[in-house]
Image (spheres, grey):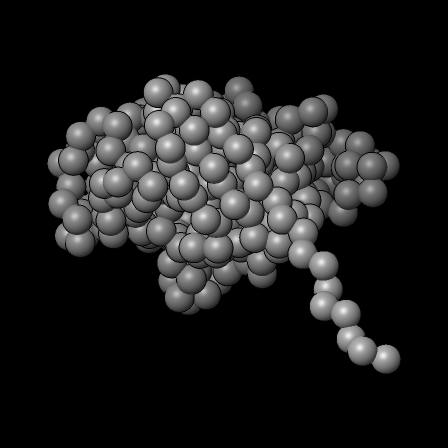
Amino acid sequence: MQKGNFILIDYVARVKETGEVFDTTIEETAKKERLYKEGEIYEPKLVVIGEGWVLKALDESLTTMEVGKKTSVEIPPEKAFGDRDPEKVKRVPLRHLTAKGITPSIGMRVEYNGKMATVRTIGAGRVLLDFNPPLAGKTLVYEVTVQKNLKTLKQKIAALIHRRTPVVEETKFKLTVKEKTVNIEMPEEAFYLEGIQVAKRGVAMDIQRFFPKITTVKFIETFKAEPKTES
């Protein structure tokens, strides 16, 4: 593995001190650890090594991994989300939250003065809010398996498209690459996706960034008339 490789990874991420799983790409694990979210897509994640799509310490360790071999990576707080800062823990009046329609509970994430915080304690008309990132001060352990190292230009472009449109099966997009042009024939189910125009622009920018020789990206949407029935 080296910088610039397009790889697909599965991982389970835990807090070392407690063993708590806080993130995973594996649906079975998400359900087992009660992390599963309806509508979330669980599948191997595309990472371009060196692009900062994962934590820097994890990104750097990917170059030492082999396809199909599970590797454990331990990341100390200073290379993850930093140490906890006691100055970022504040007591605020409960009424400031209830006035916004928020009924706080311990562990809940709330927005206060434009910043996200975790509710730590509630009592005597006051709430203790922790504005540190939830994983600040924690040592993280990632169990990572590189499932695939993408080799061909078409594989890499297909993965970039899927990254922007994960709800549509990757194989439903038809790709042709001719010299400096990429033609992407879109499946009908992608036409009406929320945010599809932003996704298309993102795909085009990704392709031209990683493959600068490609100067034109065309998206082809074909609408077929319904067959007429004889009356």
Q: Is residue 111 above or below residue 24?
A: above
Quarter of the figure that contains the N terminus = top left
Residue occupying the far front of the picture? 230
Q: What residue is shown at x 29% (from left), y 26% (from top)? A: 50
Residue 227 screen position, x and y as percent? 72, 68
Residue 129: image quadrant is: top right
Q: Is residue 184 left or right of residue 82?
A: right
Q: Residue at x 47, y 37 (%)?
A: 183
**Along the line of sight, which residue is nearer the eye, 199 or 82?**
199
Q: In the image, is 61 to the left or to the right of 197?
A: left
- Residue lying at the far bottom of the rendered structure: 231
Q: Nearer the viewer, residue 63 or 6?
A: 6
Task: Decide: is 196 above or below 40.
Answer: above
Q: Nearer the viewer, residue 155 or 135?
A: 155
Where residue 179 appears, as percent x and y from the top left, is 35, 27
Question: Is residue 26 visible from the viewing direction of this image?
Answer: yes
Determine whether, in the image, residue 16 is placed left or right of residue 112.
left
Which residue does the image show at 58% across and 61% down from the upper left?
38
Figure quadrant of the C terminus: bottom right
Q: Relative to 157, does residue 115 appear above or below in the rendering?
A: above
Report x, y in % for residue 6.
Answer: 29, 37
Residue 205, position as x, y percentages in the image: 49, 25
Query: 40 or 128: which is nearer to us?
Result: 40
* Residue pictured at 31% horizontal, 51% vertical: 10
